[in-house]
């Protein structure tokens, strides 16, 4: 059933494009659309720009990609003039950068803050999207772009009694905007993913007692964060053309680093250990780039995993705590590897306790404690580091209706289905930035965001120039792409982990490998070839021509 837009007669409420989200994807999308003379309105549920960096304000929050690479490349002046202060920028600085971009390119006038997009319905007759927002208004648009972010829908755990806890409860994905001081408090942190690994060392310095509740141990590499010198910044800036080219075309993950020329078992034990040691001392995500088969070969992967487990045993003084902190149920890198500052050393502090909830599950939260089968742990405050409903969670919160009234949630009930991670069949003119089926979270997100936004903007210009009204993924092209994404994933070790890549952290969510693991460079080439062939695999609809009236 098609729904007639209620405000079609009001031209002020009609746009070429509605963009959902004002993070790094939404801001760049708006900038590109303006540049090609298209009208756009961005709706953002937060009170400011920045997306995930607007919401994630927990102690110790910072990016795991080096600042000089986790930045826009579309403006040469911007990348030459902005001064990052540290190797890995902290959250306040990334948010400052996002606000600088919004001001520099005068984006705010087309962004409506504190507004959720609640519903989007495609009118098959008018060939327009009718978009309803939380302020009770409805607008129409030819295109809708979902720039909702991959890690922006915080997942609240379903723990009995959580609602009756008398102390303060914080989620790392929805942290208060004012400072939180844990001085003198007994704090419980539930979860040991990336946000916990970053926040635990900071909270431990304040709290009188910190209890960390761990279900699954995670691999983490030291960040070796440090202030950037003028010389380091200038060297990077001078080499930006090659760094950006390499990230787009050669790097699998969109990060500039040396490419390995051998597998882990091609070196002897001493040489291999020496290379791991050098990367450990350098710090950062490039630890996994020492060898070219760590994601492919279990025996090779074991050499890296054993090295990191040995490092944890060296750092953590209590043997039982060290054992619990050593991951043993997934290959290293098959969950997004974490980087940290003194995470493992924090468990040597006398005020920090690790509780293994895999063998001793949390039964409930009382008014003042976390109750496990063994005992009650008294706490004054709770920090939920329980992650996100990744990649699809923010999209699922919007009631999206495509052709025939089908909802996107109905279509994706058994797992997300897209062509190239950009569109889903049956939903014309609905684009997704870094959606499931694209490299997305397996990459430097800004590299992937810029590539998707450029592709979408170019596609919209192509449609306008060729008089095309609609575009959507062909069913067979989508089926082949979903099969390809999973086929490639299962040539690697990634599916061996119960990770959020698979949706495994959300009870009841279908298990399907969501990101495309084939690499940023090959994926970009596929997208470029599809466009060069007149958007092969997409179905285009011509604008209806007005009928000529025969002369009497």
Image (cartoon, grey):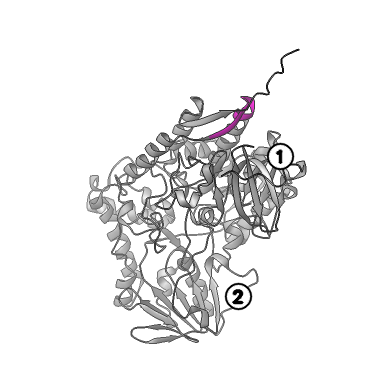
In depth, the one of 453 and 421 nearer the eye is 421
Quadrant (top left, top right, bottom left, bottom right) of the N terminus:
top right
Vertical placement of residue 500 versus 479, above or below: below
Location of mark 1 (residue): 39
Contact check, label 2 and label 1, Cβ < 8 Å: no
Q: Quadrant of residue 526?
A: top left
Q: Secondary structure at mark 2?
A: loop
Q: Secondary structure at mark 1?
A: loop
Relative to residue 443, is residue 178 drawn left or right?
right
Quadrant (top left, top right, bottom left, bottom right) of the C terminus:
top right
The mark that comes first in sequence, 2 or 1, is: 1
Furthest residue to the front?
Answer: 552
Residue 433: x and y, percent?
A: 54, 45
Residue 107: x and y, percent?
A: 71, 47
Q: Quadrant of residue 283?
A: bottom left
In depth, the one of 397 and 543 nearer the eye is 543
Q: CA distance from mark 2 to mark 1?
A: 41 Å
Q: Is residue 466 magenta?
A: yes
Location of mark 2 (residue): 180
For the point 53% across and 46% down, the residue is 405
Furthest residue to the top?
Answer: 552
Vertical placement of residue 343 versus 94, above or below: below
How many circles with numbers are drawn on the protein? 2
Q: Residues within 10 Å of mark 2 (few under 14, many from 20)?
A: few
Q: Residues within 10 Å of mark 1 (few under 14, many from 20)?
A: some
The disc at residue 151 is none
Q: Is residue 335 magenta?
A: no
Relative to residue 438, is residue 470 drawn left or right?
right
Residue 169: x and y, percent?
A: 54, 76
In depth, the one of 322 and 324 nearer the eye is 324
Residue 487: x and y, percent?
A: 32, 42
Which range is magenta?
462-471
């Amino acid at each position: 059933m098609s729904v007639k837009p209620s405000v079609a007669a009001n031209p002020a409420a009609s746009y070429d494009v509605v963009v959902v989200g004002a993070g790094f994807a939404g801001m760049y999308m708006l900038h590109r659309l303006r540049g090609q003379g298209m009208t756009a309105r961005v709706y953002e549920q937060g009170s400011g720009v920045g997306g995930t960096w607007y919401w994630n304000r927990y102690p110790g929050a910072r990016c795991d990609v080096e600042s000089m690479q986790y930045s826009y490349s579309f403006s040469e002046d911007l990348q030459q003039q902005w001064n990052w202060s540290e190797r890995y920028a902290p959250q306040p600085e990334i948010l400052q950068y996002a606000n600088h971009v919004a001001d520099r390119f005068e984006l705010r006038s087309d962004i409506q803050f504190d507004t959720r997009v609640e519903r989007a319905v495609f009118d098959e007759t008018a060939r327009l999207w009718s978009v309803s927002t939380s302020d009770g208004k409805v607008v129409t648009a030819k295109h809708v772009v979902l720039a909702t972010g991959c890690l922006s829908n915080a997942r609240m755990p379903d723990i009995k009694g959580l609602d009756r806890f008398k102390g303060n409860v914080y989620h790392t994905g929805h942290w208060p905007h004012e400072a939180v001081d844990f001085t003198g408090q007994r704090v419980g942190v539930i979860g040991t993913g990336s946000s916990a690994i970053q926040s635990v060392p900071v909270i431990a310095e304040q709290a009188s007692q910190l209890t960390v509740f761990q279900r699954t141990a995670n691999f983490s590499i030291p960040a070796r964060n440090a202030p950037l010198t003028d010389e380091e910044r200038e060297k990077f800036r001078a080499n930006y053309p090659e760094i950006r080219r390499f990230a787009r075309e050669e790097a699998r993950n969109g990060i500039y680093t040396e490419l390995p020329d051998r597998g882990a078992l091609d070196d002897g034990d001493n040489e291999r250990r020496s290379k791991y040691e050098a990367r450990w001392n350098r710090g950062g995500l490039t630890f996994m780039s020492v060898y070219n088969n760590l994601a492919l070969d279990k025996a090779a992967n074991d050499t890296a995993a054993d090295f990191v487990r040995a490092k944890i045993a060296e750092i953590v003084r209590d043997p039982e705590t060290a054992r619990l902190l050593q991951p043993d149920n997934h290959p290293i890198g098959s969950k997004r590897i974490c980087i940290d500052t003194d995470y493992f050393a924090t468990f040597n502090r006398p005020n920090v306790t690790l509780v293994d909830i895999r063998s001793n599950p949390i039964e409930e939260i009382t008014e003042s404690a976390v109750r496990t089968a063994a005992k009650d742990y008294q706490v004054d405050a709770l920090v939920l580091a329980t992650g996100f409903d990744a990649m699809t969670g923010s999209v699922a919160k919007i009631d999206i209706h495509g052709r025939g009234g089908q909802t996107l949630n109905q279509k994706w009930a058994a797992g997300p289905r897209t062509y190239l991670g950009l569109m889903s069949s049956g939903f014309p003119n609905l684009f997704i930035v870094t959606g499931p089926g694209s490299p997305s979270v397996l990459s430097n997100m800004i590299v992937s965001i810029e590539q998707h936004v450029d592709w979408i903007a170019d596609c919209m210009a192509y449609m306008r120039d060729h008089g095309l009204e609609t575009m959507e993924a062909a069913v067979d092209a989508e089926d082949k792409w979903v099969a390809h994404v999973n086929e490639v994933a299962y040539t690697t070790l990634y599916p061996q982990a119960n990770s959020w890549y698979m949706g495994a952290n959300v009870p009841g969510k279908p298990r399907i490998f969501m990101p495309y693991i084939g690499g940023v460079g090959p994926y970009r080439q596929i997208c470029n070839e599809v466009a060069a062939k007149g958007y092969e695999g997409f179905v285009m609809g011509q604008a209806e021509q007005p009928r000529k009236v025969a002369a009497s």
